[in-house]
């Protein structure tokens, strides 16, 4: 029973199965049936420890919410979406972009919360996690209020988003002695959380478009933010629509943008940028 379940499970991992068989064969030749039994038992134990190791099980994890075909693009890429990377990278970095043409369909809360889950696991200095997100889903009263905090230029297209988000960061933190001190990395940490959110949004088949064009004081009032918080940006989330749905000037800009070459912002040893 133990032997057959061990064998079935080992079929998932050829390397470990091969090692299992050779250990069995060696044990049979070496020291007779007793040793063989002992060796089989040891192999079963070895398998259990392998199967219980999350790192070795990783390949069997089912990833939900990926657009069809994503897995096939898992190897590094250098060209995608009219974008060319000078070094091979994961396709997600070229795939993510900030469109303005959105379908205006609704997003269910559970799906939206899964995007924030990715942000939750971003790194931050001393793990202070200074990011805060206030969201409004299309079809709720909150959506109209958040839309009004955006600059007019952003309202023109963000009105078709499925959700709007205000991203805030906590600018100060309380020390163990109760003193309120500035949190030096609050914006840096919140940027990391935003990007985790943006990548997860892309992986889930949606798009996220950040906006600095926002009335910050109004946003603070509308979402009711207390002292020691800063409005960093807003984000529109939506499903990609036909660019023809956009006004002429925006339609012309509706494509993934390009980037500076890496040697303009990466330097060995000494800063040499402008
Ligand atoms: C912090 C931040 C603020 C932005 N503000 C605006 C904005 O107010 N309006 C807008 O249309 N796009 C805005 N963008 C989108 C950028 O223009 C866009 O990310 C940039 O051109 C790179 O293009 P990509 O995201 O498609 O790769 C913003 C992006 C970021 C990260």
Image (spheres, rainbow, N blue to C red):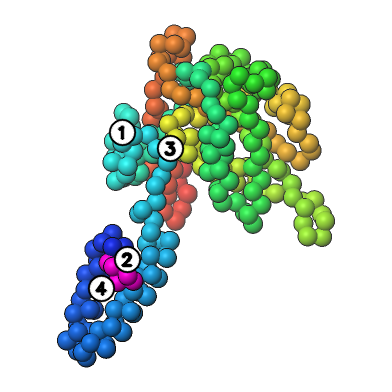
| Circle on res. 5 | 2
Residue 79 appearing in the image: yes
Crowding near the residue tagged with mark 3, few <14, some 14–19, many ≥20 C-alpha atoms within 10 Å = some
Which numbered disc, 4 or 1, marks the residue closer to the eye? 4
Q: Residue at x 66, y 45 (%)?
A: 130
Q: Residue at x 40, y 70 (%)?
A: 49
Which numbered disc, 3 or 4, marks the residue closer to the eye? 4
Range drawn in magenta: 1-7
Q: Residue at x 64, y 42 (%)?
A: 131
Going from N to C along the chain, the mark reached first, 3 or 1, is 3
Residue 85, image x and y in percent?
Answer: 32, 39
Q: Which residue is mark 4?
A: 20
Residue 43, image x and y in percent?
Answer: 31, 76
Secondary structure beneath dot 4 equals helix
Whether the residues at callouts 4 and 2 have beta carbons within 8 Å, the answer is no
Q: Is residue 123 left or right of residue 77?
A: right
Q: Which residue is mark 1?
A: 80
């Amino acid at each position: 029973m133990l032997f057959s379940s061990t064998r079935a499970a080992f079929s998932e991992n050829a390397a470990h199965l091969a090692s299992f068989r050779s250990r069995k064969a060696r044990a049979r030749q070496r020291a007779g049936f007793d040793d063989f039994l002992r060796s089989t038992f040891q192999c079963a134990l070895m398998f259990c420890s392998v199967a219980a190791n999350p790192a070795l099980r990783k390949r069997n994890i089912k990833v939900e919410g990926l657009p069809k075909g994503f897995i096939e693009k898992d190897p590094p890429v250098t060209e995608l979406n009219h974008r060319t990377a000078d070094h091979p990278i994961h396709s997600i970095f070229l795939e993510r972009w900030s469109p303005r043409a959105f379908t205006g369909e609704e997003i269910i809360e559970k799906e939206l919360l899964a995007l924030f889950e990715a942000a939750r696991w971003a790194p931050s200095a001393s793990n202070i996690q200074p990011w805060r997100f206030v969201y409004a889903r299309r079809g709720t009263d909150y959506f109209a209020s958040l839309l009004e905090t955006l600059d007019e230029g952003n309202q023109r297209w963000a009105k078709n988003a499925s959700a709007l988000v205000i991203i805030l960061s906590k600018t100060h933190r309380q020390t163990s002695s109760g003193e309120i001190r500035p949190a030096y990395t609050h914006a840096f940490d919140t940027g990391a959380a935003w990007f985790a959110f943006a990548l997860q949004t892309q992986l889930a088949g949606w798009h996220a478009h950040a906006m600095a064009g926002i009335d910050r004081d109004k946003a603070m009032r509308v979402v009711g933010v207390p002292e020691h918080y800063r409005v960093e940006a807003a984000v529109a989330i939506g499903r990609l629509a036909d660019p023809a749905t956009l006004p002429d000037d925006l339609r012309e800009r509706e494509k993934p943008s390009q980037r500076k070459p890496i040697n303009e912002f990466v330097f060995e040893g000494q800063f040499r940028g402008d």
